[in-house]
């Protein structure tokens, strides 16, 4: 048989981690890697964080799963905490980012349905966006590499240029339900939306009673130095999808909404077998215990400034390879003058884990609790590796 037992949908690298400790991963042959990928923005507390580990262990020994048919004190407590910390009035828990986006899409459509406008069911989305791998979320993007071979895809999305307010406004018509947007495109190449764009989308939604739906699956949960990236823009969404860092490595996500936006999400309209189980809720609480305070968020912002500064200082020494740094907080992208995938692969051989993204960008997504020594080690190793890298002609 030629096919591998693990369905071969990933170009799996020779890195085979079996253990993690703080910002480091260890391979099955004892190799040590400095992990500035964090499972693609997931392990925000690093590996084996004692508070998260204990919370998961204690909850696993008490109660792992019960059906959403029963009352959930664990779910109520975490939902209340997210409500207190954000724009939201209500929360639906999921197991992944794509599911959180699916719930967000359903909530936006259902809002208009609830108000007797079922024809308003199209979300305007943006070029190079990534919202997940379900049929719904690949239908929301224009990227052939995500969509090819999966037709028929779903109607109900209209893709326009990212960060172009005129294009977004021009696309609004009588079928528009709202906008679905990543405030900082992640997979698309670490591109932060401008202030005018995000504020402009908010105004259009206010004027026309549309839903502003943010996909903060990658940029949310303290990564930018605020609990959620929308806080940088001085606006609030109607609906927001969160996942990745929210469980610190435990698979969970959530769809957050205002009371107004969730008007149509009544009993029987949505559900999940596993979403919101007590084990996930314990992980979510433990993550918020650590990150949801000014001291931690300010520390992330300071760390980000140091890392960015160090990268910016290093870049001119390797101008055959690096073009510049972009991003917000600890969601950084180094734009390369060559293929980022090949360079990220090469860095793994030098003990550094980063992630490639679109537009030849190398994503730098470290755990949020790294220190000065990790930054120095990263930049020194990156610089040494860059010195020895021959940019293919
Ligand atoms: N949305 C964004 C912005 C993402 O970056 C991702 C994953 O990379 C997703 C949605 C999908 O999340 P998941 O892989 O957990 O389904």
Image (cartoon, rainbow, N blue to C red):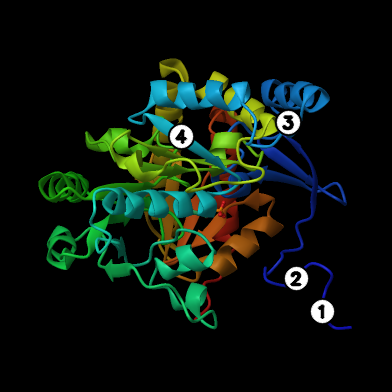
Element class at badge 2: loop
Horizontal side, residue 245 vs residue 140: left or right: right
Residue 39 appears at what percent x and percent y? 62, 48
- Residue carrying label 2: 7
Residue 75 appears at what percent x and percent y? 58, 27
Residue 61 appears at what percent x and percent y? 83, 24
Q: Quadrant of the N terminus?
A: bottom right
N-term mark: 3 or 1: 1
Report how far apart the C-alphas of labels 2 and 3 lie in the structure.
28 Å
Q: Is residue 169 in view from this perspective?
A: yes
- Residue carrying label 3: 48
Element class at badge 1: loop
- Residue carrying label 4: 91
Who is closer to the viewer here, 389 or 378?
Answer: 378
- Residue carrying label 1: 3
The quarter of the picture where residue 241 lies is: top left
Q: Is residue 11 above or below residue 183?
A: below
**Residue neighbourhood size for the residue with mark 1, other residues' Cα within 10 Å, grouped as few (<14), some (14–19), many (≥20):** few
Report how far apart the C-alphas of labels 4 and 3 lie in the structure.
27 Å
């Amino acid at each position: 048989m030629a096919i591998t037992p693990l369905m071969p949908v990933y170009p799996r690298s020779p890195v085979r981690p079996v253990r993690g400790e703080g910002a480091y991963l260890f391979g099955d042959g004892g190799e040590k890697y400095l992990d500035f990928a964090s499972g693609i923005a997931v392990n925000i507390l690093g590996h084996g964080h004692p508070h998260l580990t204990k919370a998961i262990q204690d909850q696993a020994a008490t109660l792992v799963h019960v059906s959403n048919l029963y009352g959930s004190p664990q779910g109520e407590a975490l939902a209340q905490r997210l409500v207190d910390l954000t724009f939201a009035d209500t929360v639906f828990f999921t197991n992944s980012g794509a599911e959180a986006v699916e719930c967000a899409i359903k909530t936006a459509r259902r809002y208009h349905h609830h108000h007797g406008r079922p024809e308003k069911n199209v979300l305007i989305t943006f070029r190079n966006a990534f919202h997940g791998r379900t049929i719904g979320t690949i239908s929301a993007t224009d990227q052939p590499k995500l969509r090819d071979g999966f037709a028929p895809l779903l109607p109900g999305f209209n893709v326009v240029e990212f960060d172009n307010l005129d294009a977004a406004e021009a696309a609004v018509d009588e079928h528009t339900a709202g906008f679905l947007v990543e405030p900082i495109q992640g997979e698309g190449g670490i591109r932060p939306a401008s202030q005018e764009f995000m504020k402009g989308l908010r105004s259009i939604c206010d004027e026309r009673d549309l839903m502003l739906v943010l996909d903060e699956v990658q940029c949310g949960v303290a990564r930018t130095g605020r609990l959620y990236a929308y806080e940088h823009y001085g606006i609030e969404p109607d609906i927001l999808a969160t996942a990745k860092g929210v469980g610190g490595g435990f698979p969970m996500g959530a769809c957050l909404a205002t009371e107004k936006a969730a008007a149509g999400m009544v009993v029987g309209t949505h559900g999940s077998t596993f979403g919101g189980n007590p084990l996930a809720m314990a992980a979510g609480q433990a993550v918020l215990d650590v990150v949801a305070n000014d001291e931690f968020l300010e520390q992330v912002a300071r760390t980000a400034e140091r890392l960015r500064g160090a990268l910016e200082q290093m870049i001119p020494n390797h101008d055959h390879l690096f073009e510049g740094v972009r991003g917000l907080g600890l969601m950084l992208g180094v734009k390369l003058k060559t293929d980022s995938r090949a360079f990220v692969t090469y860095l793994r051989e030098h003990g550094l884990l980063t992630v490639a993204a679109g537009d030849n960008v190398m994503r730098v997504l470290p755990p949020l609790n790294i220190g000065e020594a990790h930054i120095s080690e990263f930049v020194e190793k990156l610089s040494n590796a860059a010195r020895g890298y021959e940019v293919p002609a």
